[in-house]
């Protein structure tokens, strides 16, 4: 018997959104992507377009590395454990992870860690030796625990671009007794039917990963040359968040053997949208109560909105998420929360409309830089407009 491949799906209310999505991937050099939207616990958009790699169209089961999008996934897992009483946001991290208390960090709380106020943004030169020590998750985690905090953490947030993932993953391991990937599988991925929430990608699934391109650059310069230039500006701390050779490291196949939740999450749009779909729907999806409405209200409340010493502008940090300014009117309050990723991918939940949206792509940003890509924001604004109808 011949099995038909899964088909794309669009609720007629969201046809305009899908038309905008399709326009992003008209040429092979545009790469490809996938977009999934849930509203009130039901799928309303599930589409894909473009190319996963040269001469190979994006398929229904293609997945993509989504960079910092994974921070929202890791944060959600921690909140599941917190709701169960396995940790408290206002308890000191050292209570659960004794080694973390060295070098003057004994006062730092879980809440501060989740809002990028642990002062551990720096990954560059954290470990001596070759750059491929980046793939040694345990060594990096131990080095972060031993490192002194940046003193600016007492005044404001400092975006932990990569280190956030190591810190949250280790905290989850300490309080759950499970490896991070196992906890994610059993607590979120399997219950929600969201298999493709991967940080260590199974070997038999790696052929599904879209090829990311172009090579990471900033304003046409190599990542390293731009790092040296930015090191002399107010963005110096931003470049410290990445290790030397970062552009090469993120294209190394060994990345998928590692667990680096701050940067190497590999997802389908479908899996991301299901997780955020629960959070947008009072925590409930297909009979699974991921979190209670009370917990969701707590974890999405703004904690910090001061100039971030790494990113050099204000970030509305909640507990592991940032506000998503995707509404067409500046007068509307920002009710959506989630996480963007380098290059344009991201996912969010909007409880005000009961909507979640996830977008993954292998085309990293625009012609000049992968930073500040606006595709997710545009798609989100359109989706919000249609969801309000």
Image (cartoon, rainbow, N blue to C red):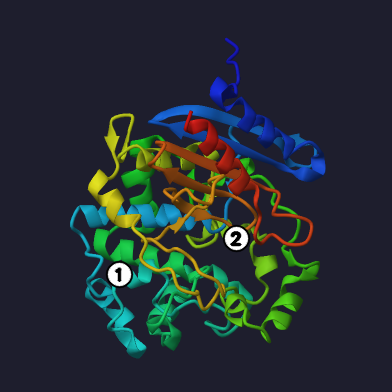
Q: Where is 52 relative to 153, above or below?
A: above
Query: Residue at 68% of width from left, 30% of height from top?
Result: 19
**Image side of residue 258 versus residue 34, left or right:** left
Judged from the image, the secondary structure of the residue bearing numbered disc 1 is helix
Residue 289: mark in rendering: none
Asked whether residue 59 appears in the rendered view, the answer is: no
Q: Nearer the viewer, mark 1 or mark 2?
A: 1
Tell me if I can see residue 339 in this picture: yes
**Place of residue 310 in the rendered image (x, y in percent of width and height, measured from the top left):** 54, 76
The answer to whether 38 appears left or right of 17 in the picture is: left
Task: Report x, y in % for residue 189.
Answer: 39, 42
Q: Could you say where residue 149 lies in the image, as x and y percent from the top left?
A: 41, 85
- As drawn, the label of residue 254 is 2
The residue shown at (26%, 51%) is 295
Q: Which residue is mark 1?
A: 110
Q: Secondary structure at mark 2?
A: helix
Above/below status of 254 relative to 278: below
Query: Above or below — where is 18 with respect to 296?
Result: above
């Amino acid at each position: 018997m011949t099995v038909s491949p899964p088909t794309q799906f669009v609720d007629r209310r969201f046809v305009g959104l899908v038309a905008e999505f399709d326009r992003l991937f008209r040429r092979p050099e545009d790469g490809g992507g996938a977009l999934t939207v849930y509203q009130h616990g039901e799928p309303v958009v599930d589409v894909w377009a473009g190319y996963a790699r040269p001469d190979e169209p994006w398929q229904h089961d293609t997945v993509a590395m989504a960079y910092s999008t994974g921070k929202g996934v890791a944060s959600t897992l921690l909140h599941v454990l917190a709701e169960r009483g396995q940790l408290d946001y206002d308890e000191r991290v050292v209570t659960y992870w004794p080694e973390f208390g060295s070098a003057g960090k004994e006062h730092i709380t879980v809440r501060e860690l989740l809002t990028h106020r642990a002062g551990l943004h720096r990954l560059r030169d954290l470990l001596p030796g070759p750059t491929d020590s980046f793939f040694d998750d345990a060594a990096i985690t131990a080095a972060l625990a031993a490192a002194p905090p940046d003193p600016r953490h007492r005044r404001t947030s400092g975006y932990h671009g990569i280190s956030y993932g190591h810190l949250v993953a280790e905290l989850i391991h300490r309080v759950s007794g499970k490896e991070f990937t196992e906890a994610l599988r059993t607590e979120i991925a399997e219950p929600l039917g969201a298999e493709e929430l991967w940080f260590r990608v199974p070997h038999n699934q790696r052929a599904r990963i879209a090829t990311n391109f172009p090579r990471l650059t900033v304003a046409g310069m190599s990542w390293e040359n731009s790092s040296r230039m930015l090191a002399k500006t107010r963005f110096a701390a931003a470049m410290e968040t990445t290790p030397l050779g970062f552009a090469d490291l993120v294209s190394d196949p060994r990345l998928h053997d590692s667990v680096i939740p701050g940067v190497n999450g590999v997802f389908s749009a479908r899996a991301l949208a299901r997780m955020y779909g629960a959070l947008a729907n009072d925590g409930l999806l297909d009979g699974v109560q991921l979190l209670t409405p009370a917990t969701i209200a707590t974890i999405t409340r703004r904690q910090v909105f001061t100039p971030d010493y790494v990113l050099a502008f204000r970030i509305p940090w909640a507990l592991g998420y940032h506000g998503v300014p995707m509404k067409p009117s500046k007068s509307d309050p920002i009710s959506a929360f989630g996480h963007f990723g380098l290059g344009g991918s991201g996912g969010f939940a909007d409880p005000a409309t009961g909507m979640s949206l996830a977008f993954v792509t292998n085309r990293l940003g625009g012609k000049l830089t992968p930073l500040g890509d606006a595709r997710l924001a545009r798609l989100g604004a359109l989706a919000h407009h249609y969801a309000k109808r």
